Image (cartoon, rainbow, N blue to C red):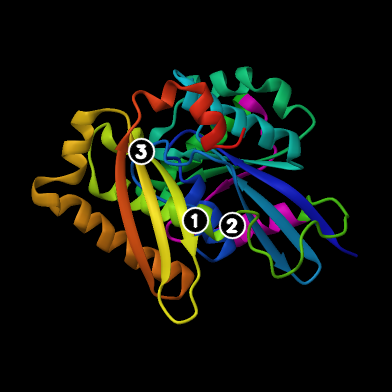
Amino acid sequence: MRKCGYVAIIGKPNAGKSTLMNALLGCELSIVNKKAQTTRNKILGIFTEKNIQIVFIDTPGLFEPKYELQKFMMSELKSSFKEADIILHIIDVTEFSMRALKDIEDRFAKEFKGKKRIVVLNKIDLEEQDDVKSKMVMLKEEFKFETIIPISAKEDFNLTEVQREITDNLPVSEFFFDDEILTDKPEKFFVAEIIRQKILDLYQDEVPYSVYVDIVEFIERKDAKDYINAEIVLERETQKIIFIGRNGDKIKMLGKFAREGIEKFLKKEVYLKLFVKVRKDWRKDKKFLREAYKQ
């Protein structure tokens, strides 16, 4: 008897959603960074073992959208609710707020209705044990959550219990994907995400959030390194000066780190070309976003 289903991983920005999915899959699929709101698209991570297939959906963080890009991110989140058989709600125990949780419960009451909910308290390695226990009691009393699991996604603590709880609640179903498939996204998507991750690592303030990465060309070559031409779109000319750096030192560093990350992911050598351009206020441009994110 096979069991298969979709599990939407939701939570506030920087709660550890991508870290958790990567840990449950056993590979780095979603980009992870200390900066909030790094995930823009929903990303499927497919775990298949024996007669079990879990289709994890890594989602953008729960927040109030202020401009068009963030509205797109929220549409990605809401569409994941429709697909999900199980909602895995991750809460950062170090940023615990009953008011914020109440807002989420009220705001998404319709989407949560009828769904199996598994709540995980993440980052418990950073909190006193007695505090973790008291917060679990508060959650049970206030929201009547049936399943609350304390974990540390970063330290791989108690993830077996999360996997078991998910498996127990999966519907009986044939697999949705072939056994060997890990994700629904093409290599080109992850190459762009790796470049964006390195941008998040290297740049500060608003610059990383103002970046869109477009893979213009991705050519696999038999007798030479694969050729990748990536276009980095910024919102303002002043950002371009910061991005490139004095004598081009900053973008050279980005190229080096991005190429190394891409080669590690693809397991082959690549020639990476980066080109920087400005499209004013692209995050507010509906037409650009429709094309960029294929809405």
**Residue 264 x/y as whole percent:** 41, 70
Mark 3: few/some/many CA within 10 Å (<14, 14-19, 20+)? some
User: Residue at image x 8%, y 46%?
Assistant: 246
**Is mark 3 in CB contact (under 8 Å) with mark 2?**
no
User: Residue at image x 42%, y 26%?
Assistant: 283
Q: What is the secondary structure assignment of the residue under circle 1?
A: helix
Q: Considering the image in quadrants, where does the N terminus appear? A: bottom right
**Is mark 3 in CB contact (under 8 Å) with mark 1?**
no
Mark 2: few/some/many CA within 10 Å (<14, 14-19, 20+)? few
Q: Amino acid at mark 2?
A: Pro
Pick the residue in front: 185 or 14.
185
Please identify the quarter of the rendering in which residue 72 is found. top right
Q: CA distance from mark 2 to mark 1?
A: 7 Å
Q: Nearer the viewer, mark 3 or mark 1?
A: 3
Q: Which residue is mark 3?
A: 233
Q: Which residue is mark 1?
A: 190
Q: Earlier in the sequence, mark 3 or mark 2?
A: 2
Please identify the quarter of the rendering in which residue 293 is found. top right
**Is mark 2 in CB contact (under 8 Å) with mark 1?**
yes
Judge whether 226 appears above or below 8 on screen. below
Q: CA distance from mark 3 to mark 1?
A: 17 Å
Q: What is the secondary structure assignment of the residue under circle 2?
A: loop
Mark 1: few/some/many CA within 10 Å (<14, 14-19, 20+)? some
Q: Earlier in the sequence, mark 3 or mark 1?
A: 1
Q: Amino acid at mark 1?
A: Phe
Left or right: 87 in relation to 92: right
Q: Amino acid at mark 3?
A: Val
Judge whether 3 appears above or below 267 on screen. above
**Residue 161 x/y as whole percent:** 63, 58
Q: CA distance from mark 3 to mark 2?
A: 21 Å
